[in-house]
Amino acid sequence: MRPREIIPGVLAVGAQDFDRRLFDALIPLPDGTSYNSYLVHGRDKTALIDTVEPAMLHVLQARLEGVDRIDYLISNHTEQDHSGSIPWVLERYPGIELLASAPAKPMLTDHLGLPPERIRTVADGEKIDLGGRTLRFIYTPWVHWPETMSTYLEEDRILFSCDWFGAHVASTELFVDGAHCVQDEAKRYYAEIMMPFRKIIQKNLEKIADLDIRLIAPSHGQIYRDPKSIIGAYRDWTDDKPHNVVVLPWVSMHGSTAIMVERLITALSSRGVAVFPFNMSVADIGQMAMSLVDAATLIVACPTVHIGPHPAVLAAVVLANALRPKARFASIVGTYGWAGKMVEVIKGAMPNLKVEFLNPVIAKGMPKPGDLEAIDRLAEAVAAKHAELGLA
Ligand code: FEO
């Protein structure tokens, strides 16, 4: 297994994981993922940027075969899918200097048990000279841990961004071009990993705005030959203004809630509002997270189970609360048999969402004509709120 050349002297030595189907024991990976590691040769010195998930260490080892000296190991991010093979690299190259951001040092010792004396911290803006090639470290915190930084290869204008701009996709193709830069995988990745840090990412985007970037080489997925596409997508995804979209996670046990959901979808779409419904008994939560990137409104719909909401919909609410989307409005649609606290429980599960609650519609048993008219009024209220924001 040989390294793959990005440009002469800059090589991809990471691993493609075609078979992985779950990340963080939570996130579906329909397209697998990759753990990208990069080897940069200067005239005098060589640097390795990030490593690979320990389960794929054999690939990194094979790709480094014949490389007898590496001077620097740069850890852009401490999460183990990139740092987990650092102990092997330190052992294989005893003279190597491990470089990381100041906040990363205690995290590397905490998570990997690395001796602190093996880690040299680098400052924001600090550079190292490889001989004809200069690496500059740019602190880019919270993409998506507090210690994250990016590394910029000045002469070749390559930004090694680690998770930032990444995508969970395994591919034999090293590069991705043009419109493909904003492929679903990148948006799914942003939604699941980056969205909670939207405001800080806006600042990081400003920080790199004047950087002359020819290639973005992230730690997951492919290398962008058209950096403007993925940067533009990130500007849109992190922008404060949502789209004219409702996300609708729902579940129905005996069909009553399904009737209300069908009515709501029709009522919203006939008013020009796009609706993304997700039946949470079968939905891919990654798809739902992607839709939340743009949505102006979140409406959840479910029956009452015992006295609370159906757990599958409550799980969707908990996830949305964790992801902190930019949604501005929320509401609840549902049914109950004799009593319940569905509305209170759902509202209590989304404290992170800065939303205005629109009147919920809760039917007793099978929805009656009056309940369906209330659904229409909810749709009307959503359309009006979206129009007030200039989204229609
Ligand atoms: Fe790909 Fe945050 O690790």
Image (tube, helix red, strand yellow):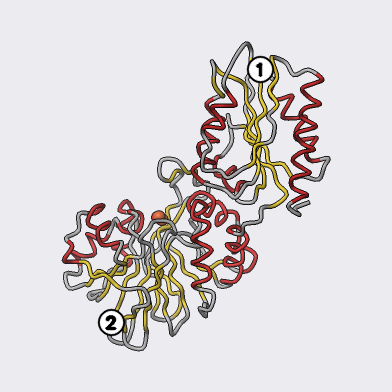
| In the displayed structure image, the side of residue 179 where residue 263 appears, left or right | right
Location of residue 165 in the rendering, given as x and y in whole percent from the top left corner: 51, 62
Q: Nearer the viewer, residue 11 or 203?
A: 203
Location of residue 352 in the rendering, given as x and y in whole percent from the top left corner: 51, 43
Q: Amino acid at mark 2?
A: Lys
Location of residue 310 in the rendering, given as x and y in whole percent from the top left corner: 56, 24
Q: Residue at x 69, y 42 (%)?
A: 246
Task: Report ligand 1 position as a quadrant.
Answer: bottom left
| In the displayed structure image, the side of residue 295 where residue 373 appears, left or right | right
The single residue placed furthest to the top in the displayed view is: 338
Q: Amino acid at mark 1?
A: His
Location of residue 299 in the rendering, given as x and y in whole percent from the top left corner: 65, 36
Q: Residue at x 56, y 39 (%)?
A: 284
Dot 2 crowding, Cα within 10 Å, few <14, some 14–19, many 20+ = some
Dot 2: element? loop
- Mark nearest the camera among 1 and 2 is 1
Report which residue position mark 2 lands on: 45
Is 295 above or below relative to 117? above
Label at residue 254: 1
Q: Nearer the viewer, residue 27 or 348?
A: 348
Dot 1 crowding, Cα within 10 Å, few <14, some 14–19, many 20+ = few
Q: CA distance from mark 1 to mark 2?
A: 67 Å
- In this rendering, the count of numbered labels is 2
Quarter placement of the N terminus: bottom left
Q: Residue at x 57, y 55 (%)?
A: 187
Is 308 above or below relative to 322? above
Q: Nearer the viewer, residue 210 or 386?
A: 386
Q: Nearer the viewer, residue 278 or 200?
A: 200
Dot 1: element? loop
Sequence-wise, the earlier of marks 1 and 2 is: 2
